[in-house]
Image (tube, rainbow, N blue to C red):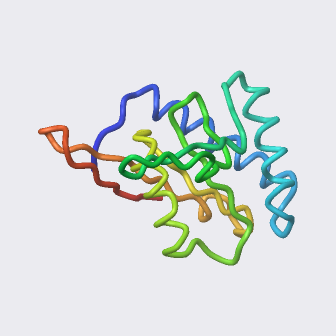
């Protein structure tokens, strides 16, 4: 697996801890919006720079499509968070985070499914990798 810089891993640990805190306080079964607001509050309270519902354009050939997609959260301008409150993380959710990483060239994405019995089981980390020549990007996931 591709190694991330220490500071990215430190931020992701803070995100993990904050998500576990929110989940252990609220429990599973709420709407995604409730978790989003509480996680946003918790991350800011811990001193992290967080933006929510970040709208981004895509460029397709000569066409720019404004607000083509929206990130649930962006932490320290490095980590994309995709929040879910669903039965399980699906291949579609994985494809979504892969696409977000590819389009933004951010190093790390995390899917946080707050509808898991244990929060640690509802978290997927997806790392953007870059080949040595710097041209091709790929993603690798882990729990």
- Count of numbered circles in the view: 0
Q: Is residue 83 above or below residue 104?
A: below
Residue 90 locus on image (x, y percent): 55, 75
Q: In front here: 131 or 62?
A: 62
Which image quadrant for residue 75?
top right
| Residue at left offset 39%, top offset 48% | 127
Q: Which residue is at the front of the view, 4 or 130?
A: 130
Image height check: is 48 above or below 75?
above
Position of residue 48 in the picture relative to residue 63 (left or right): right
Q: Residue at x 58, y 28 (%)?
A: 76
Residue 15 percent location from the top left of the image: 63, 40
| Image-based side of 73 in relation to 132, left or right | right
Q: Residue furthest top?
A: 47
User: Between 55 and 96, which is closer to the camera in this rendering?
Assistant: 55
In terms of image quadrants, where is residue 115?
A: bottom right
Residue found 66% across the figure and 63% down from its top: 113
On the rendered structure, is 53 left or right of 101?
A: right
x 40%, y 59%: residue: 141
Where does residue 78 sit, x and y in percent of width and height?
Answer: 50, 33
Q: Nearer the viewer, residue 24 or 129?
A: 129
Location of residue 10 with respect to 90 vertically, above or below: above
Residue 43 is situated, as x and y percent measured from the top left of the image, at: 73, 33
Q: Residue furthest front?
A: 62
């Amino acid at each position: 697996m591709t190694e991330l810089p220490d500071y990215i891993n430190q931020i992701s640990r803070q995100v993990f801890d904050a998500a576990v805190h929110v989940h252990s306080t609220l429990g599973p079964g709420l709407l995604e919006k409730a978790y989003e607001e509480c996680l946003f509050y918790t991350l800011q309270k811990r001193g992290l720079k967080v933006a929510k519902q970040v709208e981004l354009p895509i460029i397709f050939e000569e066409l720019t499509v404004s607000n083509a997609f929206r990130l649930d959260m962006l932490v320290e301008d490095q980590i994309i968070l995709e929040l879910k409150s669903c039965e399980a993380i699906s291949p579609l959710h994985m494809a979504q985070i892969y696409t977000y990483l590819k389009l933004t060239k951010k190093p790390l994405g995390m899917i946080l499914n707050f509808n898991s019995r244990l929060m640690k089981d509802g978290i997927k980390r997806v790392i953007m990798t870059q080949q040595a020549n710097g041209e091709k990007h790929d993603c690798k996931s882990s729990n």
